[in-house]
Amino acid sequence: MLSAGIPNPNGDGRVPMHLWAAWVTGAVKALTTAVGNVDEATKAQLQKDLSSLQGSIDTVPEEVVQAFAAADDPEEIALRLRAMLGDKATAVGQILARG
């Protein structure tokens, strides 16, 4: 999933995981702002979910984030990740291909 990206919610193709996560986070924040009748328990759960998403994003190593941020092309991203993974690239690729 990291090297292949996530299906683009705005059209064809795929996008890097960190961009997709930013879109999802932004969408959830917009929904919580737009809905004025949300009860406190729901607001608390949404905040907890947002915090969990942000925590997951924050655990991605900076070098991986940079590999995605600098390239939109999946082939270029794959080349950068392959360089970082070294001899583990094939094994990681096989795991990702399984879904």
Image (cartoon, rainbow, N blue to C red):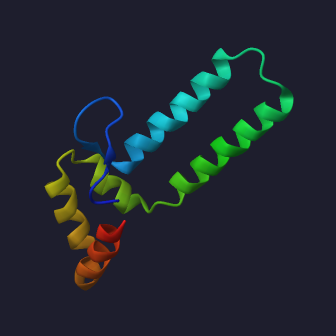
Q: Quadrant of the C terminus?
A: bottom left
Q: Is residue 97 left or right of residue 46?
A: left
Q: x and y percent of residue 61 in the render?
A: 44, 63
Q: Is residue 33 left or right of residue 85?
A: right
- Pick out the residue farthest to the right: 40
Q: x and y percent of residue 40 in the render?
A: 85, 29
Q: Is residue 35 left or right of residue 21?
A: right
- Rendered view: 86 above or below 23: below
Q: Give me the residue at 66% from left, 19% from top.
A: 33
- Rendered view: 56 above or below 94: above
Q: Give me the residue at 83% from left, 25% from top.
A: 39
- Rendered view: 24 above or below 33: below
Q: x and y percent of residue 82 in the render?
A: 22, 71
Q: Give me the residue at 58% from left, 23% from top.
A: 30
Q: Quadrant of the N terminus?
A: bottom left
Q: Give me the residue at 38% from left, 49% from top.
A: 17
Q: Nearer the viewer, residue 13 or 89?
A: 13
Q: x and y percent of residue 77 in the render?
A: 22, 57
